[in-house]
Image: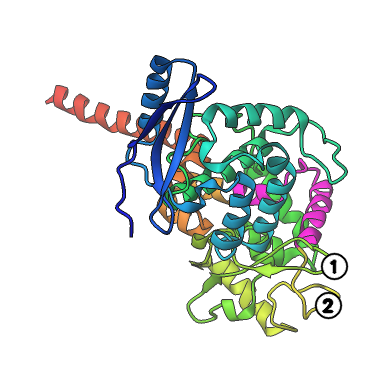
């Protein structure tokens, strides 16, 4: 095997067209032969500066042979070899759509190892204004900020993997500017509204158990629809969450893993919910805790739950909140009632407690204010007692 020369060792020469050319070694092929990067300049002094910049860029680099592939080729390799077993089918499908319609038409033919931060930034600005490229080559409407953020996160993750595979020296998405989060404001049912909602579901025999369980566990919509009786422990009162039902695609209701790895969890049910499910199990007609009303061999369709939620909210004359806001309602009341963030994080299936705290900052701020008042009161009592003494 040929002896490897250090990165930066190369050649300088004057070409027949009077321009100066230089090269540096940035990596090695599988057979040991060097991989070069070339620089052209009008003068030797200009070439020296460009070579210096190039050497700094590739300092300590040892790129592999695949570094010459295009971004489009790398994204195909990344999605099919590195991501296929790490994300849910729905997420994988969304990634592929972003790659095909938003990224490849703009940057797909660009050499992977020569992408720059400035180039990625220009791409973000352009794709936001011009939108996705359709199969007929027409362009869509301006992208939402959230879509640009998704494109950035996909590119950032894929190029991080490229760094680990020695295909790029650094991640060119680092240092770019993307739109800030503009998520729809969280809505919750306050105490009075929650009481009205609970009154309405009392008279709905088909849906009462479903929504009562949701409001006392805070499960994601796909998670509660994906519960089977094998997940319910009638002795300990524990419930395992280990699957999720997705949206119908091509006439099929997909059943897969939970949203995240930490989504697979076990929670202890409140006594009232445990009793409710115990009674429900006595009349169970299949494997699903909440089966399809017309086809009990199938789980409840999450879209049906969303649609009926709107019906119940109208009946109760309440704001038409999203289904996910029932999860926020549960979490907000739990943390306001004194459940600590770490415990709540485990119940909700969040990645860590800090995410839970960040998500419910408005609640924890109120709790901190109350805590400050309590501390202030007992300190006043202590200080007052000292003065009296």
Indicate the quadrant where residue 134 lies: top right
- Please tell me whether residue 323 belongs to the stretch shown in magenta: yes
Can you say whether 269 is above or below 95 in the image?
A: below
Helix, strand or loop at label 2? It is loop
Tell me if mark 1 has few (under 14), some (14-19) or many (20+) residues whose alpha carbon lies within 10 angstroms of its own.
few
Separation of residues labelled 2 and 1 (CA atoms): 14 Å
Q: Position of residue 200 (x, y in %)?
A: 77, 55
Q: Position of residue 264 (x, y in %)?
A: 52, 66
Q: Given this view, does label 2 or label 1 mark the residue nearer the observer?
A: 1
Closer-to-camera residue (38/236) = 38
Closer-to-camera residue (345/132) = 132
Q: Which mark is first along the chain, 1 or 2?
A: 1
Residue 251, numbered label: 1
x 55%, y 45%: residue: 332
Helix, strand or loop at label 1? It is loop
Observer able to see residue 50 = yes
Residue 362 lies left or right of residue 309; in this view the side is left
Which portion, as a residue range, is magenta? 302-329
Residue 350 lies left or right of residue 9; in this view the side is right
Residue at the front extreme of this rendering: 16
In the rendered image, the quadrant that contains the C terminus is top left
Residue 295, numbered label: 2
Can you say whether 282 is above or below 13 in the image?
A: below
């Amino acid at each position: 095997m040929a002896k490897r020369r250090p990165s930066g060792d190369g050649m300088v020469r004057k070409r027949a067209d009077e321009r100066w050319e230089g090269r540096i070694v940035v990596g090695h092929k599988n057979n040991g032969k060097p991989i070069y990067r070339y620089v052209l300049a009008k003068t030797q002094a200009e070439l020296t500066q460009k070579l210096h910049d190039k050497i700094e860029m590739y300092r300590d680099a040892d790129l592999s042979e695949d570094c010459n592939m295009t971004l489009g080729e790398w994204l195909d390799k990344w999605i099919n070899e590195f991501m296929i077993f790490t994300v849910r089918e729905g997420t994988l499908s969304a990634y592929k759509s972003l790659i095909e319609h938003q990224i490849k038409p703009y940057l797909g033919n660009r050499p992977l190892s020569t992408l720059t931060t400035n180039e990625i930034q220009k791409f973000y600005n352009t794709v936001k204004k011009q939108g996705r490229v359709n199969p007929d080559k027409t362009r869509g409407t301006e992208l939402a900020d959230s879509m640009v953020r998704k494109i950035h996160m996909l590119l950032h993750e894929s190029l991080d993997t490229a760094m680990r595979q020695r295909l790029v020296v650094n991640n060119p998405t680092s240092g770019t500017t993307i739109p800030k989060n503009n998520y729809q404001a969280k809505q919750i049912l306050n105490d009075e509204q929650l009481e009205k909602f609970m009154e309405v579901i009392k008279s709905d025999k088909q849906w009462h158990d479903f929504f009562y369980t949701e409001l006392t566990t805070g499960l994601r919509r796909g998670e509660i629809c994906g519960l089977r009786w094998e997940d319910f422990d009638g002795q300990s009162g524990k419930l395992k969450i280990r699957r999720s039902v997705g949206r119908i695609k091509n006439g099929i209701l997909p059943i897969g893993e939970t949203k995240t790895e930490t989504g697979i969890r076990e929670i202890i049910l409140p006594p009232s919910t445990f009793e409710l499910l115990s009674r429900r199990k006595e009349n169970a007609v299949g494997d699903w805790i909440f089966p399809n009303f017309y086809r009990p061999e199938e789980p409840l369709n999450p879209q049906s739950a969303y649609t009926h939620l709107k019906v119940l909210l109208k009946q109760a004359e309440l704001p038409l909140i999203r289904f996910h806001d029932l999860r926020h309602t549960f979490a907000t009341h739990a943390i306001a009632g004194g459940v600590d963030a770490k415990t709540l994080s485990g119940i909700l299936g969040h990645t860590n407690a800090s995410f839970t705290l960040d998500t419910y900052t408005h609640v924890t701020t109120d709790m901190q204010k109350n805590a400050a008042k309590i501390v202030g009161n007992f300190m006043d009592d202590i200080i007052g007692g000292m003065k009296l003494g």
